[in-house]
Image (cartoon, rainbow, N blue to C red):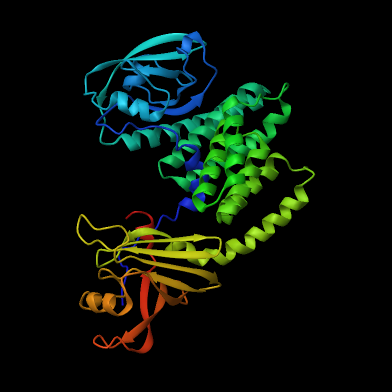
């Protein structure tokens, strides 16, 4: 029996994934120095001021009293060149600062108000607590933005209220990127309630940003042509980017929800359909959307007991393990570590099944070229001789124990004579995954 006592899950992703994806284009430089800036890749029409470039890095967030802000950079500045190298995307920026050392002064060429400017940024050693600096910054941004939004609404200055509420939403997205998914989702939804009240009072209506249109178009094409789960996830990411740029547009939430439904995550689909109805409560499709919500809620309820077991971790024998659930399709992957130069999939196990209440049934696909959860070290040679080196398919089943403390999975394992290779019988070999404790879920 294999017990996964060290298994930990990423439980918060169902609350945070939609928001975290929207921030995935930002940058924390993968070096030991920093400027206290987070960027987002944007595209634009080439002009002489941009040196013909059609993309750059827009500053979305910049920490006060850090190198970037001290050099005079501001949010909405679009960086074109760093250290003499053009920065049309994040990869180019990371390349430009890869060998920068603390104390070095690096020129940033950027566009502000359609004018080309330069700022000299003195890089500093990245502080050990930089993640907390960002988290505190987003928390202050959300708190102050909520107050400023309320004050502007009280004064009937709806244009100002709109701008302040957008800051709240984007900082909520940033907070999600710090791993504070539940708080970020709550702040996002509170900001969205405000937007639903503010936007109808704006004349003229806010223009649709070019970046929102671009990401939405990319997502629609990707979703239409999707041939795999990975393709669907990429489409959902693009919808999330569009939503980040224009969170007041109802159709983006509808598109986002449909992408998450297709991806097999009804929880995220439900959240975004509710946001769609908040922004468009009297739409002609409201009844249809309500029906879809009911359908997704039934699936989400069935999935709920399984969610604490999702994620990745390490088993007590050192094997890596990950579990996923897309719709009703439940997958366990166990990856053995056979030295630093192990070949991919050597000795690995993939279990794939479909849940039905607290049970599932499916198949185990076993690659027994090395010891694993089912094949003991002493059996590897005889197994390969008797059954061949290829993938072997075994019946599998499992269930969540009453009380939800353990997930038990079983594989119908052949008992065989190691000399003659004759299969004597099949036994169900039992393995368990323990549900993480509350302290593990909280990172304790």
Look at the picture and state if 331 lies above or below 20: below
Tell me residue 331's x, y (percent).
45, 64
Q: Can residue 384 be spotted in the picture?
A: yes
User: On the rendered image, what quadrant is the N terminus found in?
Assistant: bottom left
Q: Is residue 428 left or right of residue 193?
A: left
Quarter of the image for residue 73 reads: top left
- Residue situated furthest bottom in the rendering: 424
The residue depicted at 70 percent of the width and 25 percent of the height is: 205
Tell me residue 340's x, y (percent).
20, 55
Tell me residue 193's x, y (percent).
64, 39
Tell me residue 52's x, y (percent).
47, 14
- Residue situated furthest right in the rendering: 284
Q: Which of the two residues, 284 or 50, is positioned nearer the viewer here?
A: 50
The residue depicted at 72 percent of the width and 53 percent of the height is: 290
Q: Can residue 405 be spotted in the picture?
A: no
Q: Which of the two residues, 41 or 21, is positioned nearer the viewer here?
A: 41
């Amino acid at each position: 029996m294999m017990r996964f006592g060290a298994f930990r899950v990423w439980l918060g992703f169902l609350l945070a994934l939609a928001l975290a994806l929207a921030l995935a284009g930002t940058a924390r430089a993968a070096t030991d120095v920093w400027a206290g800036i987070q960027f987002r890749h944007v595209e634009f029409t080439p002009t002489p001021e941009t040196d013909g470039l059609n993309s750059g890095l827009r500053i979305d967030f910049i920490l006060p009293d850090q190198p970037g802000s001290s050099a005079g950079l501001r949010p909405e500045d679009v960086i074109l060149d760093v250290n003499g190298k053009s920065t049309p995307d994040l990869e180019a920026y990371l390349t430009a600062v890869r060998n920068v050392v603390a104390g070095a002064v690096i020129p940033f060429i950027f566009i502000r108000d359609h004018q080309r400017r330069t700022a000299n940024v003195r890089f500093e050693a990245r502080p050990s607590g930089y993640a907390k600096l960002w988290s505190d910054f987003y928390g202050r941004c959300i708190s102050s933005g909520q107050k400023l939004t309320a004050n502007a609404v009280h004064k009937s200055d709806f244009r100002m209220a709109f701008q302040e509420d957008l800051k709240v939403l984007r900082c909520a997205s940033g907070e999600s990127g710090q791993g504070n998914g539940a708080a970020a989702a709550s702040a996002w939804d509170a900001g969205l309630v405000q937007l639903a009240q503010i936007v109808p009072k704006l004349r003229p209506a806010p223009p649709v940003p070019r970046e929102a249109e671009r990401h939405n178009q990319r997502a629609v094409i990707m979703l239409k042509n999707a041939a795999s789960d990975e393709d669907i996830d990429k489409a959902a990411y693009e919808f999330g980017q569009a939503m980040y740029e224009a969170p007041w547009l109802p159709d983006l939430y509808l598109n986002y929800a449909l992408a998450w439904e297709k991806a097999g995550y009804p929880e995220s689909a439900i959240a975004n359909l509710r946001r769609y109805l908040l922004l468009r409560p009297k739409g002609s499709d409201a009844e249809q959307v309500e029906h879809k919500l009911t359908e997704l809620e039934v699936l989400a309820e069935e999935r709920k007991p399984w969610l604490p077991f999702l994620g990745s971790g390490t088993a007590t024998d050192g094997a890596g393990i990950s579990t996923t659930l897309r719709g009703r399709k439940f997958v366990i992957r166990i990856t053995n570590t056979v030295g630093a130069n192990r070949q991919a999939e050597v000795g690995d196990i993939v279990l794939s099944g479909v849940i039905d209440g607290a049970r599932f049934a499916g198949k185990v696909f076993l690659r027994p070229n090395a010891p694993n959860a089912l094949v003991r070290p002493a059996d590897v040679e005889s197994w390969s001789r008797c059954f061949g080196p290829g993938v072997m398919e075994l019946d599998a089943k499992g269930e969540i124990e009453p009380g939800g403390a353990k997930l038990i999975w079983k594989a119908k394992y052949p008992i065989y004579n190691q000399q003659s290779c004759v299969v004597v019988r099949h036994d169900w070999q039992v393995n368990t995954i323990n549900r993480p404790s509350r302290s593990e879920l909280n990172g304790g």
